[in-house]
Amino acid sequence: MTAAMTWISSHGPVYQRRRQCVARGAVLIIDNHTIVREGLRGFIDGEHDLFVCAEADTARDARVAIKERTRE
């Protein structure tokens, strides 16, 4: 799988999401089990000062997602 198929974006326009992913409180979830990522997302989304900006199956996919999210 490619990173584009594994990470799930937050709400809003693409540019806004990229800027949010470098903001304080942005979280990237990395786990190879979808159910675990969904559970973690549920806990994190319940916090007012945190948000999930991306999810990935592997560390390699996470690095790709980070590069794509932090480009301006």
Image: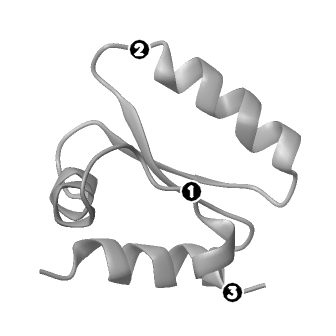
Name the image quarter holding the C terminus. bottom left
From what the image shows, is residue 45 above or below residue 29? above
* Residue 31 x, y percent position in the rendering: 75, 56
Residue at image position (81%, 39%) is 36
Viewed as shown, does residue 23 lie left or right of 42?
Answer: left
Mark 1 or mark 3, which has the lower sequence index? 3
Residue at image position (72%, 73%) is 58
* Residue 59 x, y percent position in the rendering: 64, 75
Mark 3 element type? loop
Check residue 8 in the rendering and tell me which mark sits there, or answer none: 1
Check residue 2 in the rendering and tell me which mark sits there, or answer none: 3
Amino acid on which the number 1 mark rests in the picture? Ile
Residue at image position (68%, 69%) is 6
Q: Nearer the viewer, mark 2 or mark 1?
A: 1
Q: Nearer the viewer, mark 2 or mark 3?
A: 3
* Label 2 Cα crowd, 10 Å radius (few <14 / some 14-19 / many 20+): few
Mark 2 element type? loop
Q: Indicate the quadrant where residue 66 lies.
A: bottom left
Question: How many numbered discs, if any?
Answer: 3
Mark 1 element type? loop
Check residue 47 in the rendering and tell me which mark sits there, or answer none: 2
* Residues at discs 1 and 3 in contact (Cβ within 8 Å): no
Q: Nearer the viewer, residue 33 or 14?
A: 14
Residue at image position (31%, 13%) is 48
